[in-house]
Amino acid sequence: MKNLIKLAVTLSLAAACTPSGNWADSGAVASRTSEAVTAASAVKPPAPEPTQAPKKEEKPRVVDLDSKVVVKRLVISRGVKGREPVEPTERFVEGEAERIYAFVELANPESAESAIFVSFVPENGAERGPIELAVGPSARWRTWAYTRAAKTPGVWHAIVRNAKGEEIGRTRFEIGKKDAPVADPA
């Protein structure tokens, strides 16, 4: 950029010189110089072409609406590690869990690609979700969803639906008030 400005100044000075080699009045030189510098500063070098790897062709996912997926396990937990629920529980204390997980193990006897939908629903409120989860072509499939929206104390349900929207699993969990002990259901 500095070289471009120097070139613009040199050219404007040469243009200000009369054929006899005498300098024109200094006002003309100054205005031509500032015009050249302004023009030079307005010119930006072209941005380099973005380098991106060619995109892989994505195959559209085929969902078998008639697949016979069955929920074998539906566990509410504080996390998932190694494709297994961590700290399974049905009770949380308000504000202590950033995420609440619904871990789902499915039997997929036809090994068909499908999808399930998990929703988190307070007993007297609006559904949070549904969260779509892919089901791969395997006889056994484990997957999970989580929510950060389950904050309100009370009884909640995690509901699992198949690709047709039919309920195939449900489990209950509770969020207790921060200052109140959670009663044992025994």
Image: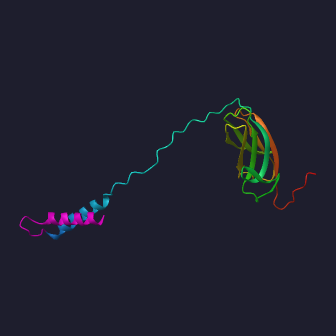
The percent position of residue 40, horizontal first and vertical second, equals: 28, 61
**Which residue lies most toward the left here?**
20
- From the viewer's side, name the closer residue of 24 and 14: 14
Q: Name the image quarter holding residue 97.
A: bottom right
The percent position of residue 149, horizontal first and vertical second, equals: 71, 51
Main SS, magenta region, reads: helix
Who's the residue at 78% across and 39% down the image? 71
- From the viewer's side, name the closer residue of 27 and 166: 166
Assign the N terminus to one quadrant of the image.
bottom left
Q: Looking at the image, can residue 126 be seen?
A: no
Q: Looking at the image, can residue 158 be seen?
A: yes
Who's the residue at 68% across and 33% down the image? 112
Q: Is 19 displayed left or right of 29 in the figure?
A: left
- Asked if residue 127 is positioned above or below residue 31 in the image, the reply reads above
Please count the marks in the image: 0
Chain part drawn in magenta:
1-24
Q: Is residue 50 magenta?
A: no
